[in-house]
Image (cartoon, rainbow, N blue to C red):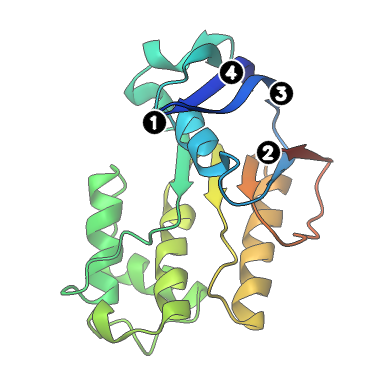
Amino acid sequence: MLEAINVTCVRGTRRLFKDLNFAVARGELIELRGPNGSGKTSLLRILCGLATPAAGDVLWDGTNIRSLGEEYSASVAYLGHQNAVKDELTAIENLRISSGVAGHALDKGEAQRVLAQVGLTQQQNLPARVLSAGQRRRLAMTRLLTANATLWILDEVLTSLDQAAMGLSRDFMTEHLKNGGAAIVATHQDLNLTASSVKRLQLS
């Protein structure tokens, strides 16, 4: 499904990694490991198409992602370090607007059901600026549940979550993999997910 071929990343005058090769298929999980500064976030941005590698190619079903445009973007859901939550909007407004921009319009009832899945029913009408760090992360997670994307690319998805929210995240990822999705997750923690295949990719 997704294949990286001889991917090299350079930031400024520093080469973060060189000639990286791996592939992920439906039902598979890749845990991306490495110390801070090793290039984990840079690699995820390359895989999303948000950055261009210094060398090498990223293929989606055999075609370079740079030639696919929106066709590829619709197949990928990316959750980065930043939650991309608007402070002045309520939780339900954030969800409905972000989903609409992504092409998946939600009515109020649908949005409420998604917020209930992440335990934010009571906070749905509060402005995001008053939510805790964990609640904001839960709100960001709702974008994964509404994206209908085959590939999830996640950067430290368990950061700022309490134990209950970590359990929810693992449940969502496990369900996604069981349904034929794939995931690439940068993490410092063991995910302990059930998947047909779990690979570990280490950046040094």
Frontmost of labels 1 and 3 is 3
Q: Which residue is mark 1?
A: 73
First of labels 3, 2 by sequence position: 3
The three-letter amino acid code for the residue at tag 2 is Gly
- Report if the CB atoms under discs 1 and 2 are less than 8 Å apart: no
- Mark 4 to mark 3: distance in Å? 9 Å
User: How far apart, in angstroms, are the residues tagged by discs 4 and 2?
Assistant: 26 Å
Mark 4 or mark 3: name the one nearer the start of the chain: 4
Q: Which residue is mark 2?
A: 180
| Quarter holding residue 136 | bottom left
Q: Which mark is residue 7?
A: 4
Secondary structure at numbered mark 4? strand
Horizontal side of residue 145 vs 62, given as left or right: left
Q: Is residue 58 above or below residue 117?
A: above
Q: Which residue does the image show at 36% across and 74% down from the upper left? A: 112
Q: Quadrant of residue 197?
A: top right
The Cα atoms of the two marked residues, 4 and 1, are separated by 19 Å
Q: Circle 3 — which element?
A: strand
From the viewer's perspective, tell me whether residue 25 is left or right of residue 192: left
* Cα gap from disc 3 to disc 2, whole angstroms: 19 Å
